[in-house]
Image (tube, grey):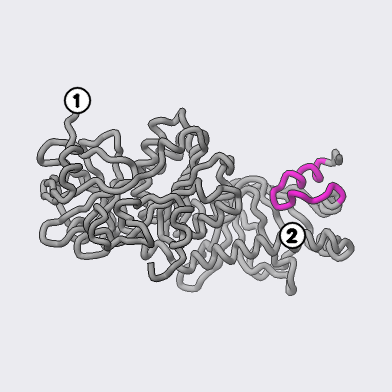
């Protein structure tokens, strides 16, 4: 059992639940703890996607600046959620803005380091990709529901 | 002791009682909450989750779930959204005006059966109205339940019902409240996203949880899937179905749902009872 604080920190994250101690140690080598005050931009659309975040506390708004409508929040994510997967796919640039809504603490994993690690250890790479695929699928499903505007035709009872 | 009209309603469910409109609260652009007082002075006892047939004179009759406190049967409370002729007429009523009421009808939420369990309440849009009496009952008997969580989703911040009450509930230490909207606005600092995304934030023991839900049917279908994912089985999930109730007593067949009548066997059903029929478009 590892006593490395970062490995222990990662072991407690729902997104990484079930990974072996050696895999967690590999990830810990890419990780740092970071915090953002309320209102701070965590990243901006079009910037290089250099990190991936696991939120430990606080909430983050994913936003787009829509002409004529201003900054629009598409979705919020909170404690235990992962933030960002643009670092996984070329051209490795953020597709949204992310802004801390509250004081937010996160584990940040360096994207270069993570890609190298996943390439070198395909088993870890596969386990992480499965988790990302699940997250992307869940968010896609949620977005579809959001687009349906279901409450517009809600029950009158 | 308060006299009630339960005996009279049991004898003749078709009898219309007159109620006077008392206080009116505008909840959203098209939704109001009305307090109704019986002209005969007799209360209208009901179980959380039951509905009445409201009759705005000359504009038809419409089934509306009761949204008040079952511990206060002297005041009948309904939250009504103006979507058709009858509901528009109800929403246009002013204090002192009158309307007819039949009921209460149907099977309500399993607030007694849920004792000893964690309770997860998932509401979408105006679906919070039928669930509010259940929340009142759960909170009145708070010590008899484990954790109680309310997950509530609406279209926009201005579509949220009972905002003052939600704020009060959020301030309680014995109730977890998570609210989300599909589209935020500049002044909204809460969650944005569908209600199913709140599930992972709720703290409950899936094996010992009873889930109550009401909202658009598609929202309930996806919520059931999320509950299944986290380990809440179908026989512990209850939902309130919306169908075209007319008579309220299972005679006319308007609300037939497979082998069941929503007015009589529902509107609250255990999910495993209706699961086979819920995906059939013709029903």
Residue that carries the numbered disc 2 in the rendered image: A51
Q: Residue A42, position in %: x, y?
A: 65, 57
As drawn, which residue projects farthest toward the right? Answer: A120
Mark 1, Cα crowd under 10 Å, few <14 / some 14-19 / many 20+, is few
Q: Is residue A116 left or right of residue B168?
A: right
Residue drawn where x is 48% and y is 48% of the image? B237
Disc 1 chain ID? B
Q: Is residue A139 magenta?
A: no
Disc 2 chain ID? A
Quadrant of res A88 = bottom right
Mark 2, Cα crowd under 10 Å, few <14 / some 14-19 / many 20+, is many
Specify start and end residues of the magenta stretch as a single range: A5-22
| Residue A90 in view in this figure | yes
Mark 2 lies on a secondary structure that is strand
B25 or B72, nearer to the observer: B72
Mark 1 lies on a secondary structure that is loop
Residue that carries the numbered disc 1 in the rendered image: B1
Q: Is residue B223 above or below residue B107?
A: below
Q: Residue B167, position in %: x, y?
A: 41, 41
Q: Of tags 1 and 2, which is closer to the observer? A: 1
Q: Is residue A7 magenta?
A: yes
Residue drawn where x is 30% and y is 48% of the image? B106
Instruction: Look at the numbered discs 1 and 2 and tell me whether their residues touch, using CB distance below 8 Å.
Output: no
Q: Is residue B240 above or below residue A73?
A: above
Q: Residue B235, position in %: x, y?
A: 50, 48
């Amino acid at each position: 059992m590892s006593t490395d604080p970062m490995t222990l920190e990662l072991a407690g994250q729902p997104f990484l639940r079930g990974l072996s101690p050696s895999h967690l140690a590999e990830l810990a080598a890419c990780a740092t703890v970071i915090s953002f005050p309320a209102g701070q931009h965590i990243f901006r659309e079009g910037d290089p996607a250099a990190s991936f975040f696991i939120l430990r506390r606080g909430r983050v708004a994913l936003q787009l600046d829509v002409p004529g409508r201003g900054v629009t929040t598409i979705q919020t994510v909170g404690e235990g959620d992962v933030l960002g997967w643009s670092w996984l796919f070329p051209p490795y640039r953020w597709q949204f803005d992310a802004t801390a809504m509250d004081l937010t603490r996160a584990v940040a994993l360096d994207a270069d380091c993570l890609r190298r690690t996943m390439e070198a250890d395909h088993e870890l790479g596969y386990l992480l990709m499965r988790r990302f695929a699940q997250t992307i699928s869940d968010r896609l499903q949620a977005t579809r529901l959001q687009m349906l505007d279901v409450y517009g035709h809600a029950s009158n009872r | 002791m308060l006299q009630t009209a339960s005996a009279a309603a049991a004898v003749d469910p078709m009898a219309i009682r007159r109620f006077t409109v008392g206080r009116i609260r505008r909840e959203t652009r098209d939704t109001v909450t009305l307090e109704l007082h019986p002209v005969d002075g007799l209360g209208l006892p009901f179980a959380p989750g039951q509905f009445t047939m409201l009759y705005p004179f000359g504009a038809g009759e419409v089934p509306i779930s009761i949204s008040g406190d079952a511990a206060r049967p002297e005041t009948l409370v309904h939250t009504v959204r103006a979507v058709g002729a009858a509901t528009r007429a109800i929403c246009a009523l002013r204090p002192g005006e009158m309307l007819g009421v039949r009921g209460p009808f149907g099977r309500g939420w399993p607030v007694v059966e849920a004792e000893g369990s964690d309770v997860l309440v998932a509401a979408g849009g105006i679906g919070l109205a039928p669930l509010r009496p259940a929340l009142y009952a759960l909170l009145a008997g708070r010590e008899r339940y484990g954790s109680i969580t309310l997950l509530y989703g609406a279209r926009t911040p201005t579509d949220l019902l009972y905002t003052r009450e939600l704020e009060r509930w959020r301030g309680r230490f014995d109730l977890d409240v998570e609210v989300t909207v599909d589209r935020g606005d500049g002044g909204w600092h809460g969650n944005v996203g569908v209600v199913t995304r709140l599930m992972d934030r709720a703290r409950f023991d899936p094996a010992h949880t009873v889930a109550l839900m009401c909202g658009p049917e598609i929202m309930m279908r996806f919520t059931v899937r999320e509950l299944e994912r986290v380990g809440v089985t179908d026989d512990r999930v209850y939902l309130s179905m919306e169908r075209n109730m007319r008579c309220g007593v299972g005679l006319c067949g308007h609300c037939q749902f497979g082998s069941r009548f929503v007015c009589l066997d529902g509107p609250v059903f255990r999910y495993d009872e209706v699961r086979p029929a819920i995906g059939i478009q013709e029903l």
